[in-house]
């Protein structure tokens, strides 16, 4: 609970945000599953990610007028969609506690979709950068990892600076008021480098090629060692 400038106490909504985030994900998955009965898992996952991403929820909260009910410390403009998106998640969490799952389902289906979120646009909007870069790495067999470079405690909350390494190469960096947001920014940065054939892309290709060559040499050495052992074993049998 935090005290405002006028001395009034404001309740922290983090628990409601946590609950609303989980319920919202389930509701959107439910709606998409029934709306697209013949689509594959990858399509449904990307569509759900587009519906629940921070910028989408922040925009919906703004258009619904939720920002008028948010009491918080003054923050930068770039942080607004984070706060507004959290407020929308808290609202969904409150509806779930008060009315249950089906009330959340009806709220999204009847009050949000078609008015604030167009389902067809969300389904075609490939803005889940993290999912896209992970699929690209897995397709080519490239090892990757997201690394937190710095975590700062600002007045308005935690702030994260992270990096994405692919094949040991620093492919992108991102910053955000949550790990998820910083991961998305780092993935977007990496995708931009890859799609533009940036120097980073060439470094990844070179590192991947080097790793392949080392793996091939290691396999040859392993096979040679195995063959030597087999020959030695046969010689021992003959000698006996």
Image (cartoon, rainbow, N blue to C red):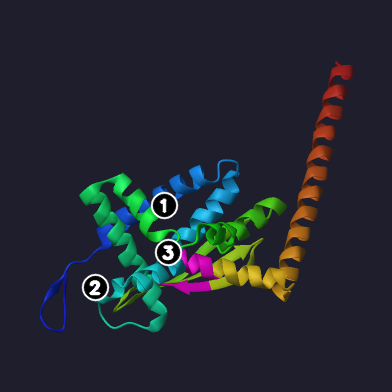
Residue furthest left as drawn? 7
Which residue is at 76% across, 50% downward? 215
Alpha carbon separation for disc pair 1 and 2: 24 Å
Alpha carbon separation for disc pair 3 and 2: 21 Å
Q: Secondary structure at mark 2?
A: helix
- Circle 1 sits on which residue? 25
Give the label, 1 or 2, closer to the camera.
2
- Circle 2 sits on which residue? 69
Position of residue 136 measured from the top left corner of the image (x, y, whole percent): 67, 57
Is residue 231 or residue 147 the one in the foreground?
147
Magenta span of residues: 174-185
Position of residue 167 measured from the top left corner of the image (x, y, whole percent): 67, 60
Which residue is at 49% across, 54% downward? 48
Q: Please identify the quadrant where the N terminus is shown.
A: bottom left
Position of residue 3 measured from the top left corner of the image (x, y, whole percent): 15, 76
Relative to 62, say whether 42 is above or below. Answer: above
Q: Residues at badges 1 and 3 in contact (C-beta under 8 Å)? A: no
Residue 56 counted in the magenta span: no
């Amino acid at each position: 609970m935090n005290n405002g400038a006028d001395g009034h106490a404001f309740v922290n909504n983090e628990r409601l945000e946590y609950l609303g985030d989980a319920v919202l994900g389930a509701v959107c998955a439910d709606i998409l599953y029934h709306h697209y009965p013949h689509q594959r898992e990858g399509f449904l996952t990307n569509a759900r990610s587009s519906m629940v991403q921070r910028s989408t929820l922040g925009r919906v909260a703004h258009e619904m007028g939720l920002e008028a009910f948010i009491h918080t410390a003054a923050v930068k403009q770039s942080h607004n969609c984070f706060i507004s998106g959290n407020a929308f998640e808290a609202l969904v969490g409150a509806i779930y506690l008060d009315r249950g799952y089906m009330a959340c389902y009806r709220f999204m289906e009847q009050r949000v979709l078609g008015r604030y979120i167009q389902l067809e646009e969300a389904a075609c909007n490939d803005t889940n950068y993290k999912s896209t870069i992970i699929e690209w790495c897995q397709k080519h067999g490239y090892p990757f990892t997201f690394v937190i470079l710095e975590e700062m405690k600002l007045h308005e909350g935690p702030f994260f600076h992270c990096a994405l390494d692919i094949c040991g190469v620093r492919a992108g960096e991102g910053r955000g008021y949550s790990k998820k947001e910083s991961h998305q920014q780092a993935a977007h940065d990496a995708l931009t480098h890859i799609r533009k054939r940036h120097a980073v892309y060439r470094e990844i290709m070179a590192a991947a090629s080097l790793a392949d060559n080392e793996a091939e040499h290691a396999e040859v050495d392993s096979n040679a060692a195995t063959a030597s052992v087999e020959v030695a074993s046969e010689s021992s049998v003959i000698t006996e």
